[in-house]
Image (cartoon, rainbow, N blue to C red):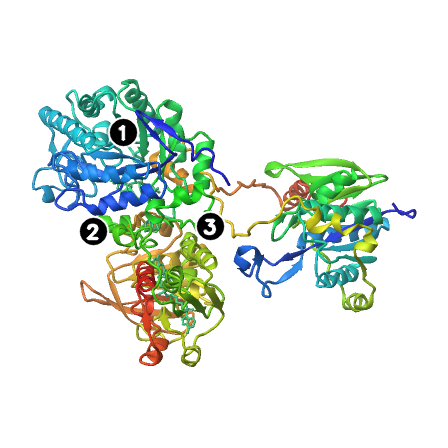
Amino acid sequence: MTANGLSVVVLLREVLDPRPPVRLAGGGVMVREPGPRRLVNPADLEALEEAMLLAEGRGARVTAVAVGPGRRLEDGLRLALAMGAHRAVRVDGPGLWEGDAVARARVLARVVEILSPSLVLAGARLLDRGDDPAPALAAAGLGLPCCTPVVSARVGDGEATATRKADRGARDVVALPLPCVLLMEGGAREPRYPDLDAVLAALGAPVETWGLPELGLPERAVGEHAALLRPERLVHPRPDPTPVPTPDPDAPAFERIRTLLSGGIRARAGRVHEGSAGEVVEGLLRILEEEGLLQGAAP
Amino acid sequence: MTFKHLFSPLKIGKVEVRNRISFQPHLTNFAVDCLPTERHMHYWGERARGGVGLIITEEMSVHPTDRAYEKLVEVFHPEVIPHFRRIADRVHEFEARIFAQLNHNGQQCDGTISRLPVWAPSPVPDVLFRETPKEMEPEDIEEVARYFGRCAVHVREGGFDGVELQFGHSSLARQFLSPLTNFRTDEFGGSLENRMRAPLMFIEAVRRAVGDDYTVGIRLCADEMIPGGLDLAQVQEIARRFEATGLIDFMDLSIATFYNLYLVEGSMHTPLGYTVPLAAGIRESVKLPVFCTGRINDPVMAEKVLAAGQADMIGMCRALICDPFLPKKAEEGRMEEIRYCVADNQGCIGRMGVNKLLGCIQNPAVGLEARWGEGSLRPAAVKKRVMVVGGGPAGMWAAKMAALRGHRVDLYERGDELGGQVLIAMKGAGRDEFGVIARNEKAQLDRLGVTVHLGVEVTEAMVLEQAPDAVIVATGSVPKAHPVAGADGPAVFNVWQVLEGEAEVGQSVCLIDYDGHHRATSTAEHLADRGVEVHIITSSLFVGAELGPLQDLYLTRQRLLQKGVTFTPDIAVMEVTGEAGDKRVKGFNVYSNEWGEWGPYDSLVLAMGQEVDDRLYKALKGKVKELHRIGDCVAPRKVDMAIWEGHKVGREI
Ligand SMILES: Cc1cc2nc3c(=O)[nH]c(=O)nc-3n(C[C@H](O)[C@H](O)[C@H](O)COP(=O)(O)OP(=O)(O)OC[C@H]3O[C@@H](n4cnc5c(N)ncnc54)[C@H](O)[C@@H]3O)c2cc1C
Ligand SMILES: Cc1cc2nc3c(=O)[nH]c(=O)nc-3n(C[C@H](O)[C@H](O)[C@H](O)COP(=O)(O)O)c2cc1C
Ligand code: SF4
């Protein structure tokens, strides 16, 4: 932890834009390049936004760390600088990111060790591959508490309070001692849109690049050498069938058929609140607050 | 992935089955002169070789009054025995077991084939066959029971491992069990005990005839899914009572009746594994091995059902029509080689009721295993450089088959993905699974080392420059440019443009359906799903005229109605007119000859036919060493013919 207050590290990872279809090559062990569009994982950018809000409120210092291969991520870092991050670090080196989550977690842990922030933020899910166990593994390796998926967080003295998503729309509120790792649920905030001046300033700002020497890690401790699992083959997944619910034998035949054919997907029933405009607005605000969807509003 | 449950053996009665996959009973129309044929032998032999544990044959008739179809096997003739022996030997050669399904269809029968009155518990006609039956007299019931027994002996003598009595969706036994069809006041009707009397006589006759050391089971309808019919709770009780007799060894299940046949062979518009809850319900009530069948088309799902204790045996019918080697591939972990059935129902059930031989749109070898089965492919004598143009189903199959025979194959597709029109078809409402047709083949092309060139439009000059040894043109078809007067006017679109999201259709659309198939209806539904008000005009008697045999008519119509789509049948459209936002349709009633005008609509969508894209073929004709043309670019048809022709040319080139 830095002497003069809160410091936050935000991890930025690169993902494939899943909208254009992905093509496989090399007999199914690689994704064909060029073609697929890549972008910074949207949930990571949201985590950065959360960090910037903390920076504004608490005067925290934000370091954006690009983890993953390739220079393209430098664009992501410049975006982070434009959004207000104070420092940008790109961690890369030959083969550094080629291992599995365990190997990548080892590098992440080292980065966190060096920067020793009060808070590490990242998106809870990757847009393309879904789960990325590496940040949580890194936290475990360092003995830091980790919470996921976080919808909102507050940081107090020596402690963070995170609201995390639980089953069926419920929320848990968790207290964690600092330093800790929070993996943010996507879709809860909109990353800010930097103005032109900031973008221009970011173009010239320094981006540090750390390789093995900076990390102080031997080659055999990272990448493929450190991996426990090796990918054998990538294939497109088959869609998962939704389970069919059991029809109520007492229901009329038409309803029984409907149940069998529904495949289990039912829209969640909404609640209807009635009253005057004022009452409805108040009710709505109450729900939003209960669900942990409102921040910065007067209690 | 390993399939712990799926590939564990199961003792069913007196026989041990090597795994939990059963090839479920289904008509084939392979019989000739009411006898099994060589075609049957090779057909079932291929599945046995493919690793299935158990095979249950198509329903076979136990009595002369039962001729639901022209091409049924009549088991009551002793002549069947030598044929059965050959079949049993072939199946046993590959360590699989085989049961015969014995059936009397009762009222679900056609007396104009048998030239005999149809027999049933009560004189109520079936909804499909619509023939008022003769109410069976007690001696008729005894006669059928006797025939069941005699037939079971023929099956045992024929070397089969067991019999299954069809008490399911189409059977005299179900008609006795169900209050829907049994109105008798004698000892065969009324109480459950009475309604079970005739079916029990059938079981007893069979057990008496074959003895205790033979496997006998039934296929029970788990829920008739019709008001006034049997439901799961009643069938649980029936199942318990059948089990309590101690005369049967297993309980296979089916669902529904001919009122709702679309539930028997659920199409891709029904969920995978849609009958699992019913099987689970029956399994709760009995200790006998219970089968679960219905859109379980992949081993992963099968394993889950077994692991969850919802069934003891997984029935796969269409999954193994489509890929006989699914079990073996699953066991050997070759999952990406499995050709998954897509439940289009076109090639299999769609051909049954109209008396054609069983087929499969994705498996041209069905019924032709002797010629095209596993191991029949010979390496090409001369290895050629083959250029395939067009990456639709025809081109993909041609490339695959040619590569399998050792040719060096280059496949060209101008789009950025393989699949051709299949990629458009799968965008229709509820048609996603259609895309699996392309997905199945993509994996094979990768594996076989076919060089795929995407985003390359092949021209005459290109072919001449590369001078391959053989060219296969599979350039497909496109919507007719000008199917009706005024089609070139504003706000007139075709189905492709709508499904590809290239059409600004506005809020109200009139879709003109000359297709009668999913092309039209799935596009209408696609629009309705997006809040567009859709009206369909067709020259047929009803919308979706081709969907009946595919078991897709009922639910399609239901969904369209629920989504507010309206219909006008009987109209031959002659002209479309007007500006965007004020489109009109002019035509006449094909029966009354009266003219009419419909509109205004924001836009019109035409499903009015395809035309070939044969430009490349014509340009190359006479200029290359060897030229073939396959699929829609010969004549616009459907996927089945595209694959058929791709398969054939790949074998012969
Ligand atoms: C909306 C819709 C729904 C349908 N629904 C069904 C259905 O339910 N059941 C069914 O059986 N059938 C259905 N069909 C029809 C079925 O998709 C076609 O019959 C089938 O795809 C024809 O296959 P093909 O390989 O002959 O041609 P296509 O699928 O047309 O493929 C031809 C390919 O060749 C490519 N090509 C053309 N010229 C060149 C060139 N010069 N260079 C490189 N590439 C070229 C094209 O881009 C295209 O990909 C549907 C079609 C549509 C559009
Ligand atoms: C072409 C065809 C014919 C069938 N004929 C019979 C039959 O004769 N007897 C029977 O009990 N079931 C019959 N069925 C139903 C199947 O046994 C099975 O229950 C159904 O196809 C659903 O299983 P699936 O999804 O694995 O195909 C038939 C199915 C098909 C596709
Ligand atoms: S024709 Fe279609 S539904 Fe029938 S077995 Fe083949 S793929 Fe499955």
**Residue that numbered label 2 is attached to:** B354
Residue type pointed to by label 1? Ile
Q: Chain of mark 2?
A: B
Q: Is residue A94 left or right of residue B628?
A: right
For label 1, the SS is strand
Vertical side of A185 occupied by B627: above or below: below
Q: Which residue is mark 1?
A: B218
Which residue is located at x 44 percent, y 68 percent?
A: B410
Chain of the residue under label 1: B
Q: Position of residue B135 (x, y in %)?
A: 11, 31
Kindly identify the amino acid type of the residue bearing the numbered disc 3: Glu
Residue B38 at x, y percent in the picture: 20, 46
Q: Is mark 3 within 8 Å of ligand 3?
A: no
Location of residue B327 in the rendering, given as x and y in whole percent from the top left corner: 39, 42
Does residue B210 appear anywhere in the picture?
yes
In-front residue for pair B435/B157: B157
On screen, A42 above or below B256? below
Q: Earlier in the sequence, mark 3 or mark 1?
A: 1
Q: Quadrant of residue B372?
A: bottom left
Q: Residue furthest left?
A: B115
B449 left or right, relative to B320? right
Q: Residues within 10 Å of mark 2 (few under 14, many from 20)?
A: few
Location of mark 3 (residue): B336
* Precedes in sequence: disc 1 or disc 2: 1
Front residue of B505/A7: it is A7
Q: Nearer the viewer, residue B564 or B171?
A: B171
